[in-house]
Image (cartoon, grey):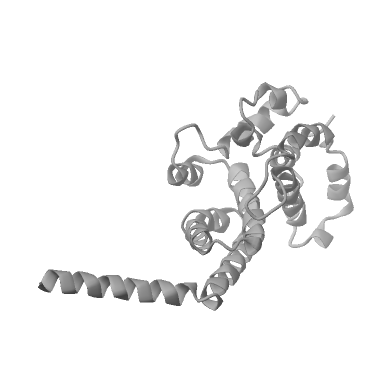
Amino acid sequence: MSKTIPIMTADHPGAMDKEHMQQLKEIFMAPYMQIATALIGKARRAGGNMFRHQMDTLAILIDYGYIDSVLLKASIVHDCIEDIPDFDENIIRNCDSEGNQVCDLVLEVTKRTGEAKDSFLRRIIEHGSEKAKILKCADRISNMISLGYVTDEKFIERYCDETEFYIFPLAIEVNFVMYQELIHLVMTRRKYLEDSGYILRKEVERKVQTTAKMIKTNK
């Protein structure tokens, strides 16, 4: 049976001592992985599927030294409620002795029906638990890495803006190293937009529209 372990972080995986490695070994995550396999058929914009994204988010948390059992289990199923139609949250709640805590954490990072994206992210900033904020940062790191395979320039710009406005504050609060990684990821995506000519084309288009408005006004 998995134990609830206080959140522990290390500067890098090698900094995790034998005691914490043993605690990680004792976390039984297979039932949550089985639940997450329902996401295999859900494709991602950058390729792959949502199941792989859950595993990637889990790996990022472990890479950062997090070994809290509830946090790691939640990362494995963090998109199930939102992305699987008519998903029964009791499947998570009844998974093991920590199921209720895991489900509650998943609900914190789940966009509610009819909830706008900005309101959802603001809710996590203002009311989210520490674990919810950490999970959202790991989720965004995974998404930003995947963004390297996306060529939709407007989407990339919008996602970078969203990351800077909503996710940077979370990362600064809970893990400065995560914040640094997110900055680097945003910078590489911004560089792609510059190299592709998108920023220049956008500026030219803006000037053309401004000129057109001035001409129209002066007629």
Horizontal and vertical percent for residue 216?
16, 69
What residue do we see at 48% from left, 61% from top? Answer: 154
Q: Position of residue 23 (x, y in %)?
A: 84, 43
Q: Could you say which is closer to the camera, residue 180 or residue 203?
A: 203
Q: Residue at x 65, y 55 (%)?
A: 46
Residue 60 placement, left or right of 121: right
In the shown orientation, is residue 204 left or right of residue 175?
Answer: left
Q: Quadrant of residue 26?
A: top right
Depth check, front residue: 193 or 75: 193
Residue 177 in view (yes/no): no
Residue 32 image point, x, y percent: 77, 34
Q: Residue at x 81, y 31 (%)?
A: 31
Residue at the spot 45% in from the left edge and 46% down from the top edge = 122
Please determine whether, in this image, residue 148 is positioned above or below residue 62.
below
Quadrant housing residue 211: bottom left
Residue 114 appearing in the image: yes
